Amino acid sequence: MNTPAFSEQVDLFTAALGLPEEPLGLYYTDSRPAFGFSPRPQTPLSQLPKENDGNLNWTSCLLGKLRRARREKAPAFFDEERYGCSGGAFFMGFKPDYEPFEPALLSTGIPGKIPGERYVDSPETGERFYNDFQPLEASGPVLVAQALSLFQDEERPELVIMFPNRKSLIGLNALTVFLTGDMNAVKMPFGVGCCTTVCWPRKLLAQGKTCAVVGGYDINMIKYLKDGELIYTVPYGLFLHMVEKWHLAVPGTRAWGRLMDKTS
């Protein structure tokens, strides 16, 4: 994968779409990378208590580690002991069940214990979301996110994560529809940051749907993004088509060139 020709194609693609950096690739594997960083070790997921009132020691957010992976060009990885928070472990597929307090956290909270995030109107609505939304099981014991240039020839990411601003999002949206022929190929489903970045794209791909998922609207993870950024996650196969054929769609037109030349 990491050949000079492919790297050059990716550079041309990111420049044409106005993406300031190379995307991240995300994949599950059997072993931790030789270098990189992760959340600090915690109680293994298999040893967590069955019932919890929200007092887990949440050490970090998956999106925070992705920010560091972008900045340092080093792998970020997660596993049964290095998961950061139980909600992230659930959406990464390492934990089969959500915590009982999470529907309340998503909604109006638990008086005297945890404030609600107010994304939905009640714990009952939050519980319906969690019960209806079953993440895919992790396909390996370690989840790795790293810059595409760090992948070796035999390695392939499952998903590719880009961080577009408003203009880049316009181009990516148009390109996705052009390449798939599907007017509904760009999704913006409900979910917290790790859900829309990792879990929704994996679920849609497992359903045989070639889709892009827009994320980055969880107010608790905006601090991990640059001003005006969102998250755009696509299957690796779709990303390859984007790199090869972007010039045939909107990003290859004069109108797009004029748009990119204008200041925001």
Image: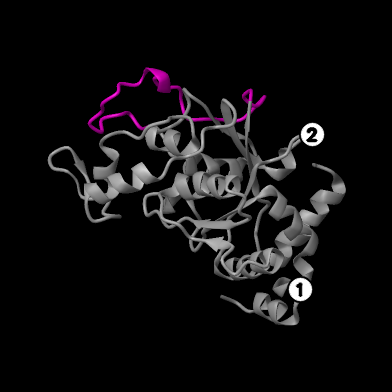
Q: Quadrant of the C terminus?
A: bottom right
Vertical placement of 93 versus 174: above or below?
above
- Using the rendered image of the protein, determine whether residue 106 is visible from the camera's viewpoint: no
- Using the rendered image of the protein, determine whether residue 22 is visible from the camera's viewpoint: yes
| Image spot of residue 189 (x, y percent) | 45, 57
Sequence order check, earlier mark of 2 and 1: 2
Task: Rate crowding at label 2 as few (under 14), some (14 to 19) or many (20 or more) other CA atoms within 10 Å.
Answer: few
Q: CA distance from mark 2 to mark 1?
A: 31 Å
Q: Circle 1 sits on which residue?
A: 252
5 left or right of 217 in image: right
Task: Rate crowding at label 1 as few (under 14), some (14 to 19) or many (20 or more) other CA atoms within 10 Å.
Answer: some
Q: Quadrant of residue 120?
A: bottom left
Based on the picture, tell me whether residue 39 belongs to the magenta stretch.
yes
Q: Residue at x 23, y 47 (%)?
A: 123
Depth check: give the residue in front, 20 or 173: 173
Name the amino acid type tagged 1: Gly
Q: Quadrant of residue 29?
A: top right
| Image spot of residue 111 (x, y percent) | 13, 42
Q: Residue furthest left?
A: 112
Q: Residue at x 45, y 22 (%)?
A: 41
SS at badge 1? helix
| Image spot of residue 55 (x, y percent) | 25, 30
Q: Circle 2 sits on which residue?
A: 154
Vertical placement of 222 versus 258: above or below?
above
Name the amino acid type tagged 2: Glu
140 left or right of 87 in image: right
> What secondary structure is the magenta-colored segment mainly?
loop
Q: Residue at x 80, y 50 (%)?
A: 7
In the image, the segment drawn in magenta is 30-58
